[in-house]
Image (cartoon, helix red, strand yellow):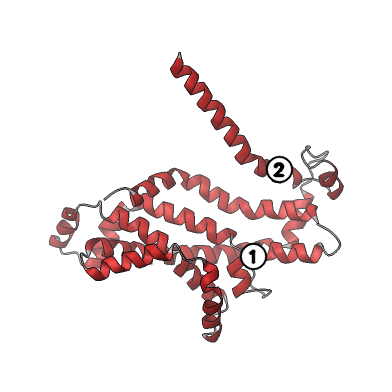
Amino acid sequence: MKKKTNLAILYVVLTVLSAVTLSPLAFLFINSFKTQSEIIGSPTALPEQWNIGYIIRAAGEIDFFRSLTITFVVTVLSVALIVLVSSLAGWIIARSKTRLSSLALYMFTAAMLIPFQAVMYPLLSIFETAGLKNITGLIIMYGGFGLSLSVFLYHGFAKSIPRGIEEAALIDGAGAMRMFFSVIFPLMKSTTATVIILNALWIWNDYLLPFLVIGNGSNRTLTLELYFARMTAGQFGNPWELIFPAVLISIVPIVTVFLFLQKYIVRGVADGAVKG
C-alpha cells in the first residue's frame, strides 16, 4: 500500500512539473493565432478563430526562409566543427598519459568556468582586425566556445573504451585516423548525440554573439530577425500578434530535432561524466 501511495505521489509531482514546463509553450501556441486585442484582453483564453494568417505574416516579416537557412548553416557547420575537434581531442587526451595531456584537459575544464563577457571585447577586437566579423567568424567563435564541455564529455567516454579494440584495428593495418573514424567514433554515438543537442540548442537560440558579430547586416539569423522585426514594428507598442507567431515558427525546427534525439542525451551525459 505504501509503495502504491509513493508511486501516486510521484505521478502527481511529475504531472505538475510537466504542466509547469509545458505551460509557456501552450501560452505561446494559443496566442500565435490571436489578434492584438485578443492577446491583450485575454492572453490565456483560446482564440475566437484559429487564424493562420498571423503565422504567414510573421514568416514574411522575419524573412523566415532566408534567416532559417542562415541559422541552419551556422548551426550545422558550428556543431560539425565542435564534434570533429572535440571528439579527436577527447580521445587523444584520454589515451595520452603525459603531463601535457593532463594540462590540456585541465585547461578545457577550466574554460567552462570563464564567462563569455570576460573575453567578449578583446575577442571581437581580434576578429574585427582579422576581417572575421561575418558568418565565417561566427562559426569559428561557436566552435571555440563549444569545445570545453564537449571535450570533457568525449574524454570521459573515451576512457571507457577498451584498448584491445584499438590494438586489433592497428594489427589489421588501420592508421590512427582510420582507426578513429571507423572504430572509435561509432562507439561514441550517445555522447555525440548529447554534444549535438546541447550545442545546437545553444547556437540556434543564441542572440548575443550574432548581434555582436553580424549586427544589422544582411545575413541575419532567426534571433536577429526577430529582434529587428520587433524593433521595427514595435515603435508605438509591443506587436504581440507578430512576436508570438514569429517565435513559434522559429523554435519548431530545433524542438523537432530535440524530440528525435532526446533519448540519447541522458545516456550521453552519463557516459561522458561517469564512465572511466
Badge 2 element: helix
Residue 40 placement (x, y as % from top left): 83, 46
Q: Amino acid at mark 2?
A: Phe
Residue 235 placement (x, y as % from top left): 83, 65
Badge 1 element: helix
Q: In the shown orientation, is residue 143 left or right of residue 54?
A: left
Observer-side mark, 1 or 2, equals: 2
Neighbourhood count class around disc 1 (C-alpha, 10 Å): few under 14, some 14–19, many 20 upward: many
Neighbourhood count class around disc 2 (C-alpha, 10 Å): few under 14, some 14–19, many 20 upward: some
Query: Real-space Cα distance between discs 1 and 2?
Result: 25 Å
Q: Amino acid at mark 1?
A: Ser
Give the total number of marks visible in the rendering. 2
Residue 14 placement (x, y as % from top left): 54, 32
Residue identifier under label 1: 67
Q: Nearer the viewer, residue 137 or 60?
A: 137
User: Seen from this angle, which residue lies furthest top?
Assistant: 1
Rendering quarter of residue 150: bottom left
For residue 27, which numbered disc appears in the image? 2
